[in-house]
Structures are given as C-alpha cells and as structure tokens.
Image (cartoon, helix red, strand yellow):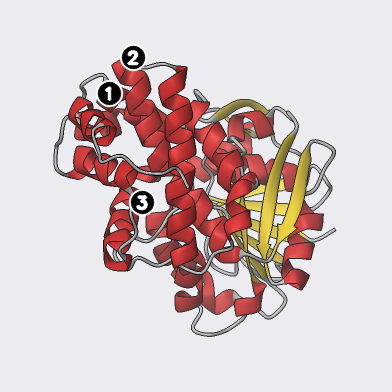
C-alpha cells in the first residue's frame, strides 16, 4: 500500500486514479477548481467524463495544493502537455527523493520543443531525474474505466519504471517496462498528428485503403523523427508506436481523430476546438513537431500537410492532393 497523488481530474487522470485505488492504495485526485473538486468528492463519480465509474473508498479528491505531496510515494501528472510546466512548478518544492514522478500527457511543449520529461527535469532543477517515468500506450480512459483489457508502457530508469509497473498492473491493465523514454514519449506525441490526418480522411469520406496508408506512412515518419532525436527504432513497432497509432487513428474515442474529421467536413479549427470539452493534444504538438523536423531536416510530408491545414488554413482536400502527387519513391 502506498500514497499516490494524481494531478488532473480529467478523464485520464480519473481513470488512472481508479486503477490505483482499486488495489487498496491511498489516492488523492487533485483538481485546481475548488468547487469541482468538492463536487467530485461528494458525488464519488466524475459524471462529466466517466459517468459510470464510481470512485473506490480509498480515492479522495482535493483542490488544496498545500502539503499535497506529504508522504507521497508517487506523483502522477495527468494534465495537458502545454500546462505541465505550470502545474509541476506548484509542487516541485514538495518533492522528495522517494517520490516517483509519472507523466501521462502525450505531447511536446510548443514554446520550447522539449519532450515532457525534459520539461519536468527543467522544473525540478536537477533533482530526482532518475525518478521520472513516462506512462504511455494505446489506452482510452473510457475503456480503462470499464475494466476492458488494456496494455501500457512504463518508461524510465529500470528501478523507477519497475515500481510504476507494479503500482498500476492489474488483471485488466497490463503494464510493460521500457528504458527508451525518448521513443515512448515521441511515439505518444507524434501519433496524435497522424490521427488528425486520419480524421481528415474520414471527414472527406475516404475509405479503409486511405486509413491504412496514413497509418503505415505515418509510422515511417514517426520512426525517422524518433531516430533523429535518439529514440530506438524498435520502440515504434510496439505499444507506444504502432499500437497507439492504430487506436488513435481508428477509435471514436480519439479527440485528435475527431478534430481531423471535422476539418475534413469543412469546419474551421477555432470552431472545432471551442465545441470540445477535452483537450486535443495533437493540435499544439503538430506545430512543435513540424518546427523540430524542419530544424533536423527530417522528411515528414503527412505532418507538413496537417500543419498547413491547422496553421496556414490550407484546405484538407488540397493537403491530400499534394501528398498523392509527390515524386515517386522507394518504400524502404
């Protein structure tokens, strides 16, 4: 039994908090909004995101930041990638050498181009870097909350990753261990941009052939980008590469695929985002990845096309035409 603090009471933070609490751990689910935290604590369910997932008895909801990490064995960061720096800075002075820091967001910080583990290291000022673990994989919160069999990867230093593996693993939530933190992070981040492209194809009305092409060629872009930044090629054939790419490109739960679909149907990005209650991490990530790829001289034509649709107001149909009419190449 241990004490775990989960910062971020969205769908994913709530689902993970339930997994941990179901094993008898003392869990504090933190939400920055005092009124919302009080409602969650009293109602014992996150009716906004996971209406049928009741809270275990060992799960408590708080909004107070003071002494939040007192005696905590694990800190789970389940906030959007672009606010991770701001949130971790609120509690960085409460961290101790025993606290394992687990990040679950999938993205790249748009203002710096940093991976999220780098953001955490930056904010905790050189302390406890071996305690940072990335938890990522093809796991939608809605299905995890229902107890449907799911698999995920804990990536970090072996000792820390093993502790996270043991913390989360259940009969329906299987956790694998990895030491390729760069590959696991980049797989989780980059696939969101490919999922937007897959959604565009759905919105336009294309079929399975198009989706298969986008997933396969998207994976090739992920591998090229990852290797340029020091990731292991084989990581992208696993759960946090191909696995996460498939589920995000195909699932109706996928926020990023949803954004792409609406773009393919002709809606404007601003309108789409205003209608969404949850964050589509792929939108800022596309910009960050595109800019990094330009600096590294990595060829990512699908990402370039998505970037132009999102940030240069290019028509989705024009993006597809441009991709299909590129110069002929060998596959490998």
Q: Is residue 151 shown to the viewer in this render?
A: yes
Question: 115 or 274: which is nearer to us?
Answer: 115
- Where is residue 139 drawn, in percent x and y? 62, 38
- Where is residue 157 drawn, in percent x and y? 69, 72
Secondary element under disc 2, as helix, strand or loop, is loop
* Residue at point 47%, 35% (across, down): 215
Q: Is residue 79 shown left or right of residue 318?
A: right
Question: 38 or 274: which is nearer to us?
Answer: 274
Question: 197 or 115: which is nearer to us?
Answer: 197
- Where is residue 71 drawn, in percent x and y? 72, 70
Q: Is residue 280 shown to the viewer in this render?
A: no
Give the mark nearer the N terminus: 3 vs 2. Answer: 2
Reading the image, the residue beneath label 2 is 205
Secondary element under disc 1, as helix, strand or loop, is helix
Extreme-left residue of the structure: 313
- Where is residue 184 drawn, in percent x and y? 58, 57
Q: Is residue 278 shown left or right of residue 273?
A: right
Q: Is residue 53 above or below residue 327?
A: above
How far apart marks 2 and 1 lie (CA) works out to: 8 Å
Q: Are marks 2 and 1 in contact (CB under 8 Å)?
A: yes
* Residue at point 55%, 27% (across, down): 47
Dot 2 crowding, Cα within 10 Å, few <14, some 14–19, many 20+: few
* Image quarter of the N terminus: bottom right
* Residue at point 49%, 83% (across, down): 125
Q: Are marks 3 and 2 in contact (CB under 8 Å)?
A: no
Residue 285 marker? 3
Give the mark nearer the N terminus: 1 vs 3. Answer: 1
Secondary element under disc 3, as helix, strand or loop, is helix
Residue 264 marker? 1
How far apart marks 1 and 3 lie (CA) works out to: 19 Å
Mark nearest the camera among 3 and 2 is 2
Q: Is residue 319 shown left or right of residue 33?
A: left
């Amino acid at each position: 039994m241990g004490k775990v603090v989960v910062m971020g009471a969205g769908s994913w933070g709530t689902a993970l908090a339930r997994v941990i609490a179901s094993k008898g751990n003392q869990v504090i689910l933190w939400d920055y909004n005092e009124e919302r935290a009080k409602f969650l604590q009293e109602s014992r369910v996150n009716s906004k995101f996971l209406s049928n997932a009741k809270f275990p008895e060992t799960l408590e909801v708080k909004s107070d930041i003071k002494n939040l990490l007192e005696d905590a064995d694990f800190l789970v960061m389940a906030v959007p990638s672009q606010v991770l720096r701001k949130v971790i800075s609120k509690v960085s002075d409460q961290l101790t050498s025993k606290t394992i820091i687990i990040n679950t967001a999938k993205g790249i910080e748009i203002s710096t181009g940093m991976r999220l583990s780098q953001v955490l290291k930056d904010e905790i000022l050189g302390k406890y870097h071996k305690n940072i673990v990335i938890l990522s994989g093809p796991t939608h919160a809605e299905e995890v909350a229902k107890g449907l069999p799911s698999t995920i990867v804990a990536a970090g230093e072996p000792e820390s990753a093993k502790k996270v593996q043991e913390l989360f693993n259940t009969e329906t939530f299987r956790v694998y261990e990895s030491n390729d933190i760069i590959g696991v992070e980049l797989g989780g981040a980059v696939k969101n941009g490919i999922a937007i492209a897959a959604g565009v194809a759905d919105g336009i009305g294309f079929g399975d052939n198009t989706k298969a092409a986008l997933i396969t060629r998207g994976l090739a872009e992920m591998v090229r980008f990852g290797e340029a930044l020091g990731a292991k090629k084989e990581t992208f054939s696993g759960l946090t590469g191909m696995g996460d790419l498939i589920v995000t490109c195909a699932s109706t739960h996928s926020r990023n695929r949803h954004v792409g679909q609406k773009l393919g149907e002709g809606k404007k990005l601003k309108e789409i985002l205003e209608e969404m209650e949850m964050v589509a991490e792929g939108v800022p990530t596309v910009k960050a990845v595109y800019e990094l790829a330009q600096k590294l001289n990595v060829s990512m034509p699908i990402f370039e096309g998505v970037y132009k649709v999102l940030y240069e107001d290019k028509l989705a149909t024009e993006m597809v035409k441009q991709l299909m009419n590129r110069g002929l190449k060998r596959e490998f």
